Image (tube, rainbow, N blue to C red):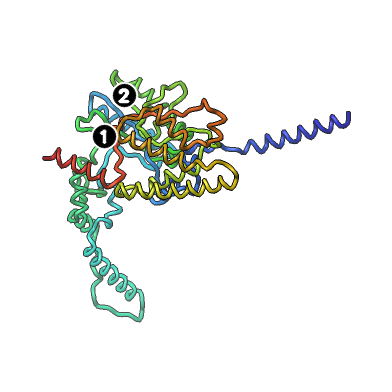
């Protein structure tokens, strides 16, 4: 009896400790969590975030048959999103006002050098004025004012391009005292004005699926009642990366083809997957032969090394043959457009899934959809592809 009570007490203690430890566990729903923290892709994404300090914005599209009503709805949405605690900024139009505080970035180097000389002379003059042992009869140097800086921006090549894009001169940007209310920025609308957009930069990341789902739910809690209160034909949609995660009961949406692998991690040759993607991204924007040689060379060396390890453990060293043979056959058939989705899934299964898992579960197969990529989403990964696109534009223009 005593032992039973003691065993029960220990079991309850361990269960309580397990519950206490489990209460602190959190699920990482970020897509980057699927890759090693030191992989090239994750490091590149993090470097971009650190450099820009921001993520992709939440974008809301509004469509009506009345341009004035479209703009009014976007203004109402912008007012609502401004009150969100996660909001960094909200944008419904574009112009040069946001660049007013960064005008010096667009001034040419020669003008900046002249202004720096004036700034040094002004500093020397102020130091002399504050010192009782220094006497000067010169007038203080005249530094450029805001109007002169804006005029220099307009004269610069960058300012000329910005003025053509926005239809706004830097002389009016950020100068509220001279504004008469007629020089607003260009609205984020199509030419007809019937489709307008609201962009909301948030402090979180849409790469975190849980965060993206939460933001999408809150956004649609605002947009759905608004659509119901408007005349028939009004549409308001959340687009972009925040549209990836469907809500419960919502039908999945067709996305552009991308790199997404859903698998049992223990069954996948993960080092091979990571190495393949790292090499593919490292060799982007290079000639195709250079890219092919780099990828094949590095992959082949790793495969040979892996087969040597298999020999030392008294296992059949077939990894090099399996990967090279199936990869070559798949590449040749893909280039000719004769491979079927079933065959491609089978060959990818042989390349990236461990032999022991394939032998233990022979009926398990992968699913690989093959789709014709939209011309809008065509990748330009090599010099040859860039030249092909340039040739197409040249042909259309002539």
Q: Secondary structure at mark 1?
A: helix
Q: Is residue 33 visible?
A: no
Q: Horizontal placement of 138 versus 14: left or right? A: left
Q: In the image, residue 94 lies at what x, y percent?
A: 26, 41
- Per the model, the C-alpha gap separating discs 2 and 1 is 26 Å
Is 6 in front, or is 254? 254
Label 2 crowd (10 A; few <14 / some 14-19 / many >=20): some
Which residue extends farthest right? 1
Which residue extends farthest left? 398
Q: Horizontal placement of 106 versus 236: left or right? A: left
Q: Secondary structure at mark 2?
A: strand
Q: In the image, residue 233 lies at what x, y percent?
A: 28, 20
Do the residues bearing badges 2 and 1 touch, measured as CB atoms within 8 Å? Answer: no
**In percent of the image, x 33 and y 50: which residue is there?**
290
Name the residue tied to disc 2: 235
Q: Is residue 117 visible?
A: yes
Q: In the image, residue 15 lies at what x, y percent?
A: 72, 33
Image quadrant containing the C terminus: top left
Name the residue tied to disc 1: 375
Residue 223 lies in quadrant: top left
Q: Horizontal placement of 2 versus 330: left or right? A: right
Numbered disc total: 2
Identify the mark at residue 176; answer none if there is no mark. Answer: none
Image quadrant containing the N terminus: top right
Is 17 in front, or is 383? 383
Which residue extends farthest top? 232
**In percent of the image, x 27 and y 78: which residue is there?**
136
Dot placed on the residue nearer the N-terminal end, 2 or 1 = 2
Is 398 in front, or is 302? 302
Label 1 crowd (10 A; few <14 / some 14-19 / many >=20): few
| Mark whose residue sits in front, 2 or 1 | 1
**In percent of the image, x 42 and y 50: which residue is there?**
298
């Amino acid at each position: 009896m005593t032992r039973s009570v003691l065993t029960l007490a220990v079991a309850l203690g361990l269960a309580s400790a397990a519950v206490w430890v489990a209460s602190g566990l959190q699920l990482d729903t970020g897509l980057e969590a699927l890759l090693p923290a030191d992989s090239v892709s994750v490091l590149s994404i993090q470097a971009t975030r650190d450099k820009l300090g921001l993520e992709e914005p939440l974008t809301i599209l509004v469509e009506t048959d009345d341009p004035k009503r479209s703009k009014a709805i976007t203004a109402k949405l912008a007012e609502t999103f401004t009150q969100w605690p996660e909001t960094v900024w909200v944008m419904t139009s574009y112009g040069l006002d946001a660049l007013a505080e960064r005008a010096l970035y667009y001034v040419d180097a020669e003008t900046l050098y002249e202004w720096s000389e004036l700034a040094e002379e002004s500093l020397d003059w102020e130091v002399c004025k504050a010192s009782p042992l220094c006497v000067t009869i010169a007038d203080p140097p005249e530094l450029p004012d805001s109007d002169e800086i804006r005029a220099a921006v307009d004269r610069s090549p960058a300012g000329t391009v910005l003025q053509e894009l926005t239809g706004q001169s830097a002389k009016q940007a950020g100068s509220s005292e001279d504004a008469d209310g007629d020089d607003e920025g260009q609205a984020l609308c199509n030419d007809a004005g019937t489709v307008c957009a609201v962009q909301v930069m948030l402090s979180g990341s849409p790469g975190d699926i849980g965060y993206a789902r939460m933001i999408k739910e809150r956004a649609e809690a605002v947009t759905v009642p608004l659509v119901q209160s408007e005349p028939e034909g009004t549409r308001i949609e959340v687009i972009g990366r925040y549209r990836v995660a469907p809500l419960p009961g919502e039908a999945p949406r067709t996305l552009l083809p991308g790199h997404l692998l859903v698998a049992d991690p223990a069954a996948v040759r993960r080092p091979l997957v990571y190495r393949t993607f790292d090499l593919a991204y490292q060799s982007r924007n290079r000639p195709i032969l250079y890219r092919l040689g780099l990828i094949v060379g590095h992959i082949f060396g790793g495969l040979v090394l892996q087969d040597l390890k298999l020999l030392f453990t008294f296992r059949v060293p077939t990894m090099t043959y399996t990967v090279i043979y199936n990869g070559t056959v798949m590449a040749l058939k893909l280039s000719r457009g004769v491979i079927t989705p079933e065959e491609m899934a089978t060959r990818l299964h042989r390349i990236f899934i461990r032999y022991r898992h394939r032998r233990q579960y022979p009926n398990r197969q992968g699913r690989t959809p093959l789709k014709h990529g939209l011309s809008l989403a065509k990748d330009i990964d090599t010099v040859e592809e860039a030249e092909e696109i340039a040739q197409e534009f040249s042909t259309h223009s002539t």
